[in-house]
Structures are given as structure tokens and as C-alpha cells.
Image (cartoon, rainbow, N blue to C red):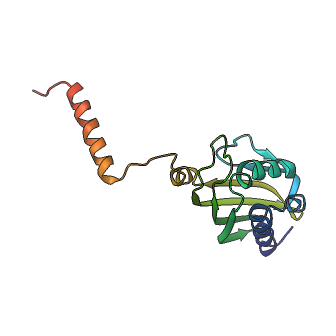
Amino acid sequence: MSSAEEIKAMQRRLFAEFFSQGKLEVADEIFAPDHVYYNPDTPEGIHGPEGMKRFVVGTFRSAFPDLRGTVEDQIAEGEKVVMRWTARGTHQGELQGLPPTGKRVKVAGMVISRSAEGKLVESWEVYDTLGMMRQLGLVVIPGPRLLGRMLVGQAKKLGARLPKRR
């Protein structure tokens, strides 16, 4: 079993070299052949080093070729490590069918990874997809004033449908 510091170093290396620099060979060194990665968009999981290469290149590196990640925090205990991260990049390529916008984004996320025999065997990740889409101009989130007006409007519509009190 790897020590907590070894697992943290493995996860940092994965983030720096594989994710940020696009060194695909690192996936073969760090992910176990039966590794499974889960996030809300992939509930069935992404399997093995080759699946991770396709996912990272196909989803992120091709859309954000200047992608860079920063490790903000790490905590490790036993065979698991948690990492809070921030990624930054410019949307220069297609992102899941969305054409490039040329906009810079900053996305925060967290990943929990479990290791066995010196390799990562499972990972669970969440990241701020809504915030990323908002920064790309694809989603508008109403501010407090607009939200208040919307809620008042909805309350008036609902009030008009309710029976009058006697």
C-alpha cells in the first residue's frame, strides 16, 4: 500500500502532467488497468487508462488547448486522497458539440481517488459545469433584482389561480 504522501504526489503528478500538459503516457503509469472514473456526466464510468486519455483529450484538452490546473488543497488518509483544484483555459475548440467562443474560463472542482498497489483504481470527481457554461456565455443566471421580479411575477400568477379566502 502507498503512503498518504505517495498517493498525494501521484495525484498531483497526474493533474500537472496528464491534465495540464497533455502527457498521455502518464495515464499508463498512474491509472490501474481496471481504473474507473465517475462524474455526474458519466455515471456509467470511464474505464482504464485508454478511456481516461480519450475523455481528457476529447472533452477538455481539445476544447481548451492552453488548459492549466492548480492544486488548491489535498487531504489523504489510508488509500484515498481528496484534491480541490482550479482549472483555467481559453475555449478554442469544440466542447461537447459547442463551437469555440474564445472566452477564458476558471473552473473549480474536487476529486477523490482511491489507490491500490501503487496506482489509482477509482476516482469520483465533481466540477462547476454551470459556472463554466455561464462564463462561456451559454447560460444566463439572473441576479438578485431580476430573480426577485421573477418570483413576484410567479407569485401573482399563482395568486390569481388560488380560490379567494372568505
Quadrant of res 119: bottom right
| Viewer can see residue 34 | no
Total count of labels: 0
* Residue 62: image location, x then y, percent: 74, 52
What residue is drawn where x is 89% and y is 60%? 25
What residue is drawn where x is 64% and y is 65%? 85
Residue in the foreground of this view, choosing between 54 and 83: 54
Q: Is residue 158 above or below residue 99?
A: above
Residue in the foreground of this view, choosing between 70 and 76: 70
What residue is drawn where x is 81% and y is 48%? 54
Specify the quadrant that holds the N terminus: bottom right
Side of 138 where 43 appears, left or right: right
Side of 67 where 160 appears, left or right: left
Specify the quadrant that holds the C terminus: top left
Residue in the foreground of this view, choosing between 143 and 8: 143
* Residue 46: image location, x then y, percent: 78, 45
* Residue 19: image location, x then y, percent: 75, 61
| Viewer can see residue 20 | yes
Q: Is residue 138 above or below residue 13?
A: above
Side of 100 where 10 appears, left or right: right
* Residue 6: image location, x then y, percent: 82, 73
Q: Is residue 5 above or below residue 39?
A: below
